[in-house]
Amino acid sequence: ILFILTVFLGYNNVSGQISNGGFENGSNPDLSNWEWTCFAEPDSSTPPGGGNWSIKVWGGNTQGCFPGYSYQKIPTITNGQTFLLTSWAFAQTAPPVGLYLGKINSGVITLQSGDTTSSISWTQLSLQSTFSLSLGDTAIVVLHAGLAGGPVQGYGYFDLINLQQVTGINSL
């Protein structure tokens, strides 16, 4: 008797571009539900397949605002859920920019896993990870714009963000 165990990985889409489907509302820019630690604004630079707008996140500076994050809370995620997170991104300056899964509790952001790039042209980032949440934690998606020292501030650009839950179905 031969038993074969297979695992099917299915992806349940939590929401494209997290909550609003894009960084635009019609032809206007829209950063609804995004928060940031330093500064973020809409930008008209987009990757192929993107809409009219992306998000431009200030990189942060050791002499000014640090760290340069933009993030969105995802309160429906619970401890132990696994997600696939993808985005297109590029760095205006040399410090790497990154896409992360994380958590926030009482205003303190903790990064859990991520993918980075130093490319100055649009590059796809991707990661799959399980959220580790404790009491009081809220899951977040974090766009980290890197760190630029001195008076020059760099930006991280992000678009086409997608978060999908990974489910496993065991069968014989």
Image (cartoon, rainbow, N blue to C red):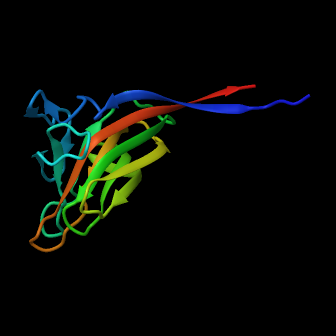
| Rendered view: 166 above or below 127 | above
- Residue 48 or residue 92, whichever sits in front: 48
| Rendered view: 111 above or below 80 | below
Q: Where is residue 71 in the image (x, y as percent from the top left)?
A: 25, 43
| Rendered view: 146 above or below 23 | below
Q: Residue at x 20, y 67 (%)?
A: 93
Q: Which residue is drawn at 30% across and 48% down?
A: 88
- Residue 75 can be seen in this image: no
Q: Which residue lies furthest to the front in this view?
A: 48
- Residue 87 or residue 146, whichever sits in front: 87
The quarter holding residue 140 reads top left
Q: Where is residue 62 in the image (x, y as percent from the top left)?
A: 18, 69
Quadrant in which the C terminus is drawn? top right
Q: Which residue is drawn at 38% across and 28% down?
A: 14
- 25 relative to 125 in the view: left or right: left
- Residue 146 or residue 103, whichever sits in front: 146
The quarter holding residue 17 reads top left
Q: Where is residue 95 in the image (x, y as percent from the top left)?
A: 26, 67
- Residue 42 can be seen in this image: yes
Quadrant in which the N terminus is drawn? top right
Q: Residue at x 7, y 32 (%)?
A: 28
Q: Residue furthest right?
A: 1
- 35 relative to 82 in the view: left or right: left
Q: Position of residue 104 (x, y in %)?
A: 32, 43
The quarter holding residue 64 reads bottom left
- 67 relative to 171 in the view: left or right: left
